[in-house]
Amino acid sequence: MSGEEPQVSPRRVLVIDDDPAIVRLLGLTLEAADFDVRKATDGRSAVEAIDDGLPDLVLLDLQLPDMDGREVFRRLRASGYGGPVVIISAHGARSARRELGADAAVDKPFDPDFVLDRVEALLSARNGHGD
């Protein structure tokens, strides 16, 4: 036998932010924690990424160049995505969380390890493995 560890499919996170540096930072942080990261820098590519396969969690900026983050959120839900969404924004993340019914909010600037902790906690709670 080659190994006894069960095959676990990687957890998929979609990072949506118009700032390529933030997308890269979050991507590197999540990939180091064994996440499969998909990235989008505008609303259109975010919606296309959802069409390619539903992620386990979405990190969503509110200010995108072609489509407001609120509209992206609504389209995510309309597409059948029911997983956790974390709003990440420099302006109004918490009020948008309440308005949209998102699962969490993170204010910019942020510590990437804090975001990773939120992602882990939301996915653990969703999968019934709360700490």
Image (cartoon, rainbow, N blue to C red):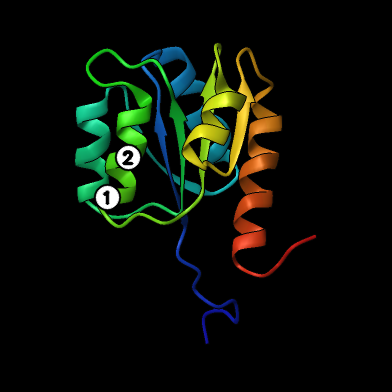
x then y, percent, for residue 131: 80, 60
Name the residue at 27% across, 34% down: 46
- Tell me if residue 72 comes above or below residue 13 in the rendering: above
Name the residue at 39% across, 15% down: 63
Q: Is residue 41 left or right of residue 59?
A: left
Image quadrant assignment for residue 124:
bottom right
Image quadrant assignment for residue 38:
top left
Q: Nearer the viewer, residue 92 or 125?
A: 92
The span from disc 2 to disc 1 (Cα, nearest Å) is 6 Å
Q: Residue furthest front?
A: 99
x then y, percent, for residue 65: 27, 12
Q: Is residue 23 left or right of residue 127?
A: left
x then y, percent, for residue 50: 27, 46
- Tell me if residue 93 comes above or below residue 54 in the rendering: above
Image quadrant assignment for residue 111:
top right
Q: Residue furthest right?
A: 131
Name the residue at 60% across, 67% down: 127
Are there few (<14), some (14-19), or many (20+) residues within 10 Å of tag 1?
Answer: few
Are there few (<14), some (14-19), or many (20+) residues within 10 Å of tag 2?
Answer: few
- Tell me if residue 98 comes above or below residue 24 in the rendering: below
Q: Total number of numbered labels?
A: 2
Q: Nearer the viewer, residue 41 or 74?
A: 74
- Residue 7: mark in rendering: none
- Residue 78: mark in rendering: 1
Q: Nearer the viewer, residue 44 or 37?
A: 44
Give the amino acid type for the residue marked by disc 1 in the picture. Ala
x then y, percent, for residue 27: 47, 31
Name the residue at 55% across, 33% down: 97
**Does the residue at mark 2 contact the one at mark 1 (Cβ under 8 Å)?**
yes
Give the amino acid type for the residue marked by disc 2 in the picture. Arg
According to the picture, the residue beneath numbered tag 2 turns out to be: 74
Mark 1 element type:
helix
